[in-house]
Amino acid sequence: MTRHGAAGRIPRPLYVPAALGLALLLLPIVGLVARADWSRMPAAITSVEALDALGLSLRTGLAATAVCLVVGIPLALVIARSGPRVGGFLRALTTLPLVLPPMVGGIALLYLLGRNGLAGAYLDLAFGIRLPFTTTAVVIAQAFVALPFLVISLEGALRSAGTRFEAVAATLGAGRWRIFWQITLPLVAPGLVAGTVLCFARALGEFGATALFAGNAQGVTRTMPLAIYTAFNGAGVGQDSAVALSLLLVAVAIVILLLMRGWRPEVKL
Amino acid sequence: MAVTVLLSGCAAHGDENHPPSQVTVFAAASLTDVFEELSHAFTAENPGITVKTVYDGSSTLAAQLTEGASADVFASADPATMDRVVKAGLVHGTPQPFATNTLEIAVAPGNPHGVKGLNDLGDANLAVVTCAAQVPCGAASVAVLARAGVDLIPVSEEQNVKAVVTKVALGEADAGLVYTTDVRAAGGRIDGVAIDGAGSVANRYLIGRLAPATDDGTTATADAFVRFVLSAPGQTLLADAGFGAP
């Protein structure tokens, strides 16, 4: 084999760990499907508990994603347009929740926004607002863990898009807002969509911060992951519905991935 | 003592080509503090043996066991949960009752909301946390509330009783239903309000030695640990922690 022939090819032995990696990712899902009791599936998925949990998860996930978009797009823009030192510092701060275990996030949120928390005590005294055990708490917990996914992927897209087109638009007399809406955002649309989807998926899967900060009450704070955990702790039939709910979440995830792929072909940079 | 005698025989065998014996105990969350004491007392009597304890809601532990988690002893907070592990064929012999426990209302120290009994928990302004009905403390909560005819919508249903204690101790919840022993173990972080007639729905704790697929020599140690829990010194520690006699 010539040196030229080896270009772009990977050493053959590497296929083995690659296949192992793929198996590690996919075989657990196979195990889940194998365990499913398909005859009980319709009843488990359409039970009040399951529908409450799915509805709550979708609503809170969408709300958290909306929150992330409102604060995340400007944050990504600020990081991308800052100098290397400030940008790097801000990026590190943004990544922190990403590397923290979500449980730690839940405890941190509790000590900030709980009834005796730094800000929570004040919220309770001044406005009578109590966040723990509310659906709002679920949205806050989800936004906390999901925001970095949006900011990091969007910030990457913003930096690779550069500022050339913005500079041209500015010389042609476009104002800052017009450049933002008509140049910057359309240029990074693929990155924005990918980041939004990741952000929504992460919000849907949020468990640890929600369990500690928001609690676990049906229809109020019991999202899909908490419903799965609660069902799994129950007796035999309960565990069947844990499997059914898990598969439902897998199906939702697959739909999200398909939606994301659906966007990709339009991308031309 | 019988325990020591039996174990010295086992340890002599183990000294030759085995590391010091270890026994893994899965125990209900409500047993956390007292099982730490029991383990220390047990290892003090049987040097060379390590007791590895895992605490969680009984139901979580039962689910882990039936899915193949490896443990030598299981102590559950109610017979129903133990039954799931027995039905899976994982328990050697018949599980033994070793303690009972009753529910109390956990409140912030000093009882700022003046909770006097279960009827006060129906107040919509009180944030009340209970265990989920799937776990023993939750099943007991449902029973005790039904008996009192109190309709309660908890702001959160936790997966184990220690999580209820924490939510009340942090002040996030105004009240919670926990075991009498949890109030005592919390050492002043929460106060307890007795529930009328709670004794009639007391939890019965069962302990069973698990039957491993292949005996690697730990079953004798595990049997000894179970006997220690049932022995007079073990029962004294349980009584000191506030547990009732089996």
Image: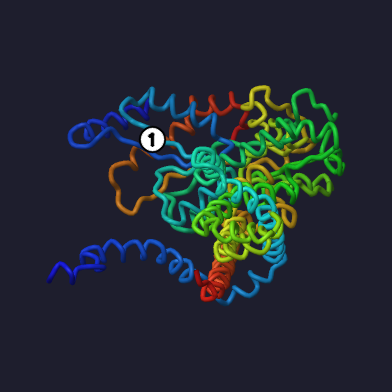
Which of the pair A241/B48 is nearer the observer? A241
Q: Looking at the image, which is closer to me, B151 or A245? A: A245
Q: Which residue is mark 1?
A: B224
The residue positioned 46% from the left and 52% from the top of the image is: B65
Question: Quick check: A56 above or below A119?
Answer: below
- Can residue B102 be seen from the camera position used here? no
The quadrant holding residue B180 is top right
Instruction: Decide if residue B143 is on the left or right side of residue A194.
Output: right
Q: Is B217 left or right of A163, judged from the image as shown?
A: left
Residue B67 is situated, as x and y percent measured from the top left of the image, at: 45, 57
Q: Nearer the viewer, residue B39 or A135?
A: A135
Given the image, what chain letter belongs to the residue carrying mark 1?
B
What colour scheme has been applied to the protein in the rendered image? Answer: rainbow
Image-quadrant location for residue A7? bottom left
Binning the other alpha carbons within 10 Å of mark 1 as few (below 14), some (14 to 19) or many (20 upward) gives many
Q: Quadrant of the N terminus of chain B?
A: top left
Q: Looking at the picture, how far across and down is residue B95, in whole percent?
A: 49, 46
Q: Count the marks: how many?
A: 1
The residue depicted at 59 percent of the width and 26 percent of the height is B241
